[in-house]
Amino acid sequence: MKKYFVVLLLLLIQPIYAKQNLFNQVVNKFKSDEQALTQFRYLGQLHCLDNKFGLPEKYQLFNHEYLRLFNGLFALPRLITQEALNKTILAI
Protein backbone atom coordinates (compact mmCIF):
# COMPACT_ATOMS: atom_id res chain seq x y z
CA MET A 1 0.00 0.00 0.00
CA LYS A 2 2.87 2.33 0.81
CA LYS A 3 4.34 1.82 -2.69
CA TYR A 4 1.07 2.88 -4.30
CA PHE A 5 0.93 6.00 -2.18
CA VAL A 6 4.50 6.95 -3.11
CA VAL A 7 3.85 6.36 -6.82
CA LEU A 8 0.63 8.40 -6.66
CA LEU A 9 2.43 11.20 -4.85
CA LEU A 10 5.22 11.28 -7.44
CA LEU A 11 2.73 11.35 -10.30
CA LEU A 12 0.84 14.26 -8.77
CA ILE A 13 3.91 16.33 -7.91
CA GLN A 14 5.39 16.25 -11.40
CA PRO A 15 2.57 18.18 -13.21
CA ILE A 16 2.46 20.75 -10.42
CA TYR A 17 6.21 21.32 -10.73
CA ALA A 18 5.95 21.46 -14.52
CA LYS A 19 3.28 24.17 -14.35
CA GLN A 20 5.37 26.31 -12.01
CA ASN A 21 8.44 25.71 -14.14
CA LEU A 22 6.63 26.85 -17.32
CA PHE A 23 5.41 30.01 -15.61
CA ASN A 24 8.93 30.74 -14.36
CA GLN A 25 10.31 30.24 -17.87
CA VAL A 26 7.79 32.71 -19.31
CA VAL A 27 8.54 35.28 -16.60
CA ASN A 28 12.30 34.90 -17.14
CA LYS A 29 11.87 35.30 -20.91
CA PHE A 30 9.89 38.51 -20.51
CA LYS A 31 11.84 39.88 -17.54
CA SER A 32 13.73 42.34 -19.70
CA ASP A 33 10.57 43.37 -21.58
CA GLU A 34 8.17 44.74 -18.97
CA GLN A 35 5.50 45.61 -21.53
CA ALA A 36 5.35 42.04 -22.89
CA LEU A 37 5.20 40.62 -19.37
CA THR A 38 2.36 42.97 -18.46
CA GLN A 39 0.47 42.01 -21.62
CA PHE A 40 1.03 38.30 -20.92
CA ARG A 41 -0.33 38.66 -17.39
CA TYR A 42 -3.31 40.66 -18.62
CA LEU A 43 -4.14 38.13 -21.33
CA GLY A 44 -3.85 35.38 -18.71
CA GLN A 45 -6.34 37.18 -16.47
CA LEU A 46 -8.76 37.60 -19.36
CA HIS A 47 -8.39 33.92 -20.23
CA CYS A 48 -9.27 33.00 -16.63
CA LEU A 49 -12.32 35.27 -16.71
CA ASP A 50 -13.47 33.71 -19.99
CA ASN A 51 -13.20 30.25 -18.44
CA LYS A 52 -14.91 31.30 -15.22
CA PHE A 53 -17.91 32.87 -16.92
CA GLY A 54 -18.04 30.43 -19.84
CA LEU A 55 -18.36 33.09 -22.49
CA PRO A 56 -18.95 31.90 -26.05
CA GLU A 57 -15.99 32.30 -28.40
CA LYS A 58 -17.59 35.27 -30.15
CA TYR A 59 -17.60 37.28 -26.90
CA GLN A 60 -14.37 36.07 -25.27
CA LEU A 61 -12.33 38.85 -23.75
CA PHE A 62 -9.05 37.05 -24.48
CA ASN A 63 -9.73 36.91 -28.23
CA HIS A 64 -10.78 40.56 -28.45
CA GLU A 65 -7.80 41.82 -26.48
CA TYR A 66 -5.34 39.64 -28.42
CA LEU A 67 -6.67 41.05 -31.70
CA ARG A 68 -6.54 44.61 -30.34
CA LEU A 69 -2.90 44.13 -29.34
CA PHE A 70 -2.10 42.45 -32.67
CA ASN A 71 -3.66 45.27 -34.67
CA GLY A 72 -1.95 47.81 -32.40
CA LEU A 73 1.39 46.40 -33.61
CA PHE A 74 2.54 45.27 -30.17
CA ALA A 75 5.41 42.78 -30.12
CA LEU A 76 3.91 39.99 -27.98
CA PRO A 77 1.01 39.02 -30.25
CA ARG A 78 3.22 39.41 -33.32
CA LEU A 79 5.78 36.93 -31.94
CA ILE A 80 3.41 34.38 -30.39
CA THR A 81 0.31 33.08 -32.16
CA GLN A 82 -3.02 33.16 -30.39
CA GLU A 83 -3.18 29.36 -30.24
CA ALA A 84 0.31 29.05 -28.73
CA LEU A 85 -0.44 31.74 -26.18
CA ASN A 86 -3.73 30.03 -25.31
CA LYS A 87 -1.94 26.68 -24.78
CA THR A 88 0.73 28.34 -22.63
CA ILE A 89 -1.86 29.99 -20.41
CA LEU A 90 -3.80 26.73 -20.11
CA ALA A 91 -0.62 24.92 -19.09
CA ILE A 92 -0.03 27.43 -16.31
Image (cartoon, grey):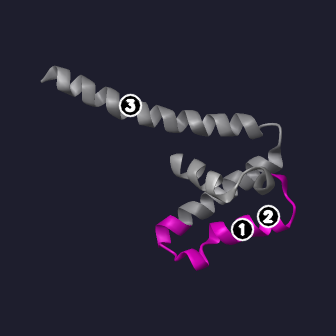
- Residue 41 lies, with reference to residue 64, above or below; the image says above
Disc 3 target residue: 13
Residue beneath the point at 44% across and 36% down: 16
Disc 2 target residue: 69
> Mark 1: which secondary structure?
helix
Q: CA distance from mark 2 to mark 1?
A: 6 Å
Question: In terms of secondary structure, what is the magenta stretch mainly?
Answer: helix
Residue 79, percent from left and from top:
78, 50
Q: CA distance from mark 1 to mark 3?
A: 34 Å
Going by the numbered disc 3, the residue's amino acid type is: Ile
The label shown at residue 65 is: 1
- Quadrant of the image for the N terminus? top left
- Does 63 sit left or right of 29 as displayed? left
- Residue 88 lies, with reference to residue 55, above or below; the image says above
Sequence-earlier tag: 3 or 2:
3
- Residue 68 lies, with reference to residue 26, above or below; the image says below
Tell me the magenta residue range: 50-75
The label shown at residue 78 is: none
